[in-house]
Image: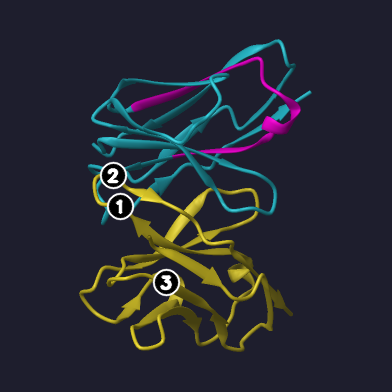
């Protein structure tokens, strides 16, 4: 199984809502990632978890809150988002988070903030 | 620090003709380089990766890339384009060694004419 799953596929939320994005993998990977991708742009790294600990936070606003409850699951909690946060949010995983790892990506959650 | 330049934002070829997507890197040492593909409204998939084992790297779906240190290039090629190759292609260098922090190139959109 080389699949990373993400739910929901689409999400529409208001600026006062609280919602969560979920990512799951069962490949035994110990590194998981969140990326943000705006239309016609490359993905931008947001967070990296390595062995369930946050190892990289790319100066992401606090209205985005990641959580890694276990090695298979990664959440992104959203609160008080702005319309400019509308984007495709991609999750990825890799074996141990070293420079030679291949990252496996999920299909993404397309988020629209009204 | 490593970075890449994808020389063409858009490439259009006819079905059955060769594909060339160009990527040049800048680095003070031999880099590790990836090519990822993203089909419309999908996540990213690894096409191939170079990690200094062999300069000619074969990937999935008939794609290959050759690492040329003298030209600081890692161009992606395919002998015969297929309609299903229409997608966005990203050249990606690896940054750092303690975690898989990757910074995507700007991307090249490949269109296939019937």
Q: Which residue is mark 1?
A: B96
Q: Same chain for the residues at labels 3 and 1, yes or no?
A: yes
Mark 3 vs 1: CB contact within 8 A: no
Identify the mark nearer the N-term, 2 or 3: 3
SS for callout 3: strand
Q: Nearer the viewer, mark 2 or mark 3?
A: 3
Q: Which chain is yellow?
A: B
Q: Residue at x 47, y 76 (%)?
A: B24
Cα distance between the residues tagged 1 and 2: 7 Å
Cα distance between the residues tagged 2 and 3: 20 Å
Q: Which chain is cyan?
A: A
On the image, the x and y values in percent for residue B45 come to 46, 56
Q: Which residue is mark 2?
A: B99
Q: Which residue is mark 3?
A: B26
**Few, some or many C-alpha atoms within 10 Å of disc 3 (few <14, some 14-19, many ≥20)?**
some
Mark 1 vs 2: CB contact within 8 A: yes
Q: Nearer the viewer, mark 1 or mark 2?
A: 1
**Highlighted range, magenta:** A73-91
Q: Residue at x 29, y 82 (%)?
A: B55
Q: Residue at x 35, y 58 (%)?
A: B94
**Few, some or many C-alpha atoms within 10 Å of disc 1 (few <14, some 14-19, many ≥20)?**
some
Foreground of the two, B66 or A107: B66
């Amino acid at each position: 199984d080389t699949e990373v799953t993400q739910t929901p596929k689409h999400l529409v939320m208001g600026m006062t809502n609280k919602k969560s994005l979920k990512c799951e993998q069962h490949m035994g990977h110990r590194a998981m990632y969140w990326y943000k991708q705006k239309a016609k742009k490359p993905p931008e790294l947001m967070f990296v978890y390595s062995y369930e600990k946050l190892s990289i936070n790319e100066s992401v606003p606090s209205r985005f809150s990641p959580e890694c409850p276990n090695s298979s699951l990664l959440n992104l909690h959203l609160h008080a988002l702005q319309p400019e946060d509308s984007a495709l949010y991609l999750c990825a995983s890799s074996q141990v988070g070293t420079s030679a790892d291949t990252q496996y990506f999920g299909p993404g959650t397309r988020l629209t903030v009204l | 620090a490593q970075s890449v330049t994808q020389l063409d934002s858009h490439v259009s070829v006819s079905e059955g003709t060769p594909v060339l997507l160009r990527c040049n890197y800048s680095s003070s040492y031999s880099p590790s380089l990836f090519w990822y593909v993203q089909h419309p409204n999908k996540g990213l998939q690894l096409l191939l990766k170079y990690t200094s084992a062999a300069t000619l790297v074969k990937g999935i779906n008939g794609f290959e890339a050759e690492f040329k240190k003298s030209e600081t290039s890692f161009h992606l090629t395919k002998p015969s384009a297929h309609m299903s190759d229409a997608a966005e292609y990203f050249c990606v260098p690896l940054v750092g060694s303690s975690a898989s922090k990757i910074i995507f190139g700007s991307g090249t959109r490949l269109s296939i004419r019937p």
